[in-house]
């Protein structure tokens, strides 16, 4: 023993140092890793016992140089027991490794639960600290690298499109997809390129609810329902119709009906937007494209390839669409039920033939103003697979002849609604053959507009061989006259509605003959702008009595005066709806007999433009039919004053809509209406009533319980009073 070192500390330290060096080399060679603690920095150092000083000397990371001093003197010394054990086990394992001994039994004993509980008891109250993995006990522990600054991080946009595509197709939910689409145009374009079949579906929801999930309030849930709910329809109009908006709507997905009306002049809807819509909404059932000139056959081909459930297609004003795009839709959309093509100069016969071959479920077709469509296209559409299902046909402005009408009459066995408009090449023979082909047995509605081929003979033939015909609308048919109306009435056994507009050869004599021979089911007659409707010099010997007629409309017939109106009142005793718009020659003397002869209560009365009617006529009307009157229009009746409003407030109990536009009513009349307790108006129009001022505002405000629509245009109420009135009538739509 060295005299200078009586306790032998130097010798002992040298031997332990040599042994520790060999142990370190052995541990490093065996690639042993020990779990070591971070060094702690606390206040003042405390003296350590000799074994721990040795461990700290050879394993400097095992025990810290400074440990936290206890708050009280009686407290035990705190140190990281697990760190010491880790260093000690590493030291012992190295020594035993030199002696070719196995340490696993010792480690097994140390891992026994009782031993662990003992360690827990020792370490109870000791603050836990983070741990790091070290490669060897002798190697210095380096601090973790600092997090890279945000400015130095690689941006997500640096990812190639393929990687970003894989990320975005895993985005779940409408809200998340919409938020991702708002990041940039690149993200929007990538999301638009994801087909519904390519999206990665979310895993099934766990059976046990996740308690760590963020709680959503009722308002948040309502917002989610609004965003992720069943928002199945979307309409883009005018300046809003762009590819970006259409693509964003497609990214949200689940759309069933999309309507594009008009297009942005510079960034309008193109094939890119239509393709994005098709990929994002494969369940699309209705597509409307109006005045979208940049959409071509490629866009329709994408719709045909993705949207196999499409049922309704409406194309109007799309000159770039041709037979190729229409044929693609016909082949790819077998569920198509309704097809409308208007103003598409590129569509010809081949496209319609393809629709007829492949769309066996087609029910309604409308072809308008397509110059290249002729008899071949119409024949190929009607006489093919669609013949058994086609119920509604509308042909307008086409270069078709009598041959097309013959095909319709023979093959259109399921047609119920037929409209023929502006067909100059169709003659009388075409209508006659169509009727005599005996194919229109189910025809219920027929509308003929500006067809010179419709004559008295043709109209009589249609009525004779169409036993189910219920409604006939004739507009600008210059060759239809009184001669066929009697025969037409006798042949139409179930006719209910006849509308005649701008047929100058039809007179009141023919109308009376029709009413004398009409079926007992006839309910409605409308005569509009027929200059031949004039007063007859002498009434017929036998006046017809049409007790089934419920609605009568005589509009803008300048020759219709009081004498004719009195005759109408005698032959129609069960009227409920009367429309005399534009009959400026009618006065009280002609209107009063109509009121008295009406045995059934009048419900809807329209006297728009009858400027010669006075308060006496209105008072008689409401006294006789106030219990049933629901709609009354006195627009343009310049002789109507507050006296009529006083009579209305006393006699009308069911009146819901009242139009007093351009009448001579004042604030007093408005006050009378507001004071009527039994009167609950829903719609009131005071447009152009110059005597209505701001004094009426309190009275109008008192009608807040029932009023839903109010028209205050062109009067002297003022914007400030309108704003005050909007607060009182918060549930009412005010037009000012």
Image: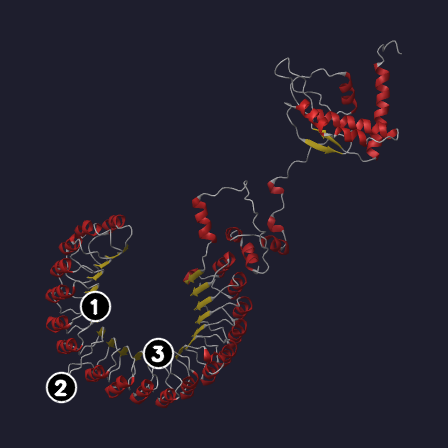
* Residue 82 in sight in this render: yes
Residue 541's disc is 2
Q: Residues within 10 Å of mark 3 (few under 14, many from 20)?
A: some
Q: CA distance from mark 2 to mark 1?
A: 31 Å
606 over 62 or under it: above or below: below
Q: Quadrant of residue 212?
A: top right
Residue 153: percent from the left, percent from the top? Answer: 62, 43
Frontmost residue, 264 versus 461: 461
Q: Residues within 10 Å of mark 1 (few under 14, many from 20)?
A: some
Quadrant showing the N terminus: top right
- What is the count of numbered marks? 3
Mark 3 and mark 1 lie on one chain; the one further toward the N terminus is: 3
Identify residue for label 1: 606
* Residue 138 in sight in this render: no
Mark 2 and mark 3 lie on one chain; the one further toward the N terminus is: 3
540 over 216 or under it: above or below: below
Which mark is nearer the camera, 3 or 1?
Answer: 3
Which residue is at the far front? 114
Indicate left or right for 643 with 518 as reference: left
Quadrant showing the C terminus: bottom left
Frontmost residue, 629 versus 330: 629
Mark 2 and mark 1 lie on one chain; the one further toward the N terminus is: 2
- Disc 3 + disc 1, Cβ < 8 Å: no
Identify residue for label 3: 444
Residue 562: percent from the left, percent from the top? Answer: 13, 76
């Amino acid at each position: 023993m060295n005299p200078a070192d009586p306790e032998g500390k130097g010798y002992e330290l040298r031997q332990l140092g040599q042994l520790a060096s060999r142990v370190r080399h052995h541990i490093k060679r065996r690639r042993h890793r020990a779990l070591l603690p971070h060094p702690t920095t606390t206040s003042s150092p405390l003296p350590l016992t000799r074994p721990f000083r040795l461990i700290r000397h050879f394993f400097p990371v095992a025990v810290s140089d400074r440990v936290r001093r206890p708050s009280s003197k009686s407290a035990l010394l705190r140190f990281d027991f697990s760190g010491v054990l880790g260093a000690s086990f590493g030291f012992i394992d190295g020594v035993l490794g030199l002696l070719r001994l196995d340490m696993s039994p010792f480690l097994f004993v140390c891992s026994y639960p009782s031993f662990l509980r003992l360690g827990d008891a020792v370490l109870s109250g000791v603050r836990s600290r983070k741990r790091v993995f070290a490669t060897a006990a002798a190697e210095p522990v380096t601090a973790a690298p600092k997090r890279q600054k945000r400015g130095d991080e690689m941006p997500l946009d640096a990812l190639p499109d393929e990687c970003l595509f894989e990320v975005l197709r895993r985005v779940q939910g409408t809200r998340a997809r919409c938020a991702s689409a708002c990041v940039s145009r690149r993200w929007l374009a990538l999301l638009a390129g994801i087909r519904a079949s390519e999206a990665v579906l979310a895993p099934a929801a766990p059976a046990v609810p996740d308690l760590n999930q963020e709680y959503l309030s009722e308002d948040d849930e309502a917002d989610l329902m609004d965003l992720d709910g069943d928002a199945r329809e979307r309409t883009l109009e005018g300046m809003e119709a762009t590819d970006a908006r259409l693509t964003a709507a497609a990214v949200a997905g689940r759309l069933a009906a999309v309507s594009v009306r008009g297009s942005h002049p510079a960034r309008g809807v193109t094939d890119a937007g239509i393709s994005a819509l098709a990929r994002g909404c494969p369940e699309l059932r209705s597509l409307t494209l109006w005045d979208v000139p940049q959409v071509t056959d490629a866009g329709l081909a994408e719709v045909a390839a993705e949207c196999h459930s499409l049922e309704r297609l409406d194309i109007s004003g799309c000159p770039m669409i041709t037979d190729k795009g229409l044929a693609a839709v016909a082949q790819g959309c077998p569920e198509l039920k309704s097809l409308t093509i208007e103003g598409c100069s590129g569509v010809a016969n081949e496209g319609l033939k393809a629709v007829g071959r492949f769309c066996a479920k087609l029910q309604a077709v409308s072809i308008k103003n397509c110059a290249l469509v002729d008899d071949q296209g119409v024949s190929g559409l009607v006489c093919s697979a669609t013949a058994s299902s086609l119920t509604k046909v509308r042909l307008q402005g086409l270069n078709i002849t009598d041959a097309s009408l013959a095909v319709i009459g023979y093959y259109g066995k399921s047609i119920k609604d037929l409209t023929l408009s502006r067909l100059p090449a169709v003659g009388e023979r075409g209508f006659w053959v169509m009727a005599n082909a005996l194919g229109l047995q189910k025809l219920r509605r027929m509308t003929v507009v500006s067809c010179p081929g419709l004559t008295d003979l043709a109209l009589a033939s249609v009525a004779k061989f169409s036993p189910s015909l219920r409604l006939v609308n004739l507009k600008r048919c210059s060759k239809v006259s009184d001669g066929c109306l009697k025969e037409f009435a006798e042949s139409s056994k179930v006719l209910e509605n006849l509308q005649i507009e701008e047929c100058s050869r039809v007179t009141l004599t023919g109308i009376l003959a029709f009413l004398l021979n009409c079926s007992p089911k006839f309910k409605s007659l409308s005569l509009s702008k027929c200059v031949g409707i004039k007063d007859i010099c002498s009434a017929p010997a036998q006046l017809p009595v049409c007790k089934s007629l419920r609605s009568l409309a005589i509009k803008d017939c300048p020759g219709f005066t009081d004498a004719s109106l009195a005759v109408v009142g005698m032959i129609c005793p069960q009227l409920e709806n009367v429309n005399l718009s534009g009959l400026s020659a009618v006065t009280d003397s002609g209107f009063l007999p109509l009121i008295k002869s009406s045995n059934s209560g009048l419900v809807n009365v329209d006297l728009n433009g009858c400027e010669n009617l006075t308060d006496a006529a209105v008072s008689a009307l409401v006294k006789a039919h106030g219990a049933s009157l629901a709609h009354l229009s006195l627009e343009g009746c310049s002789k109507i004053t507050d006296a009529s409003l006083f009579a209305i407030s006393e006699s009308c109990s069911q009146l819901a809509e009242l139009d007093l536009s351009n009448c001579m009513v004042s604030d007093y009349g408005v006050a009378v209406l507001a004071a009527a307790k039994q009167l609950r108006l829903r719609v009131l129009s005071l447009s152009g009533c110059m005597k209505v001022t701001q004094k009426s505002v309190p009275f109008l405000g008192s009608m807040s319980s029932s009023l839903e629509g109010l028209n205050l245009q062109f009067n002297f109420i003022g914007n400030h009073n309108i704003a005050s009135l909007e607060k009182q009538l918060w549930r009412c739509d005010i037009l000012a």
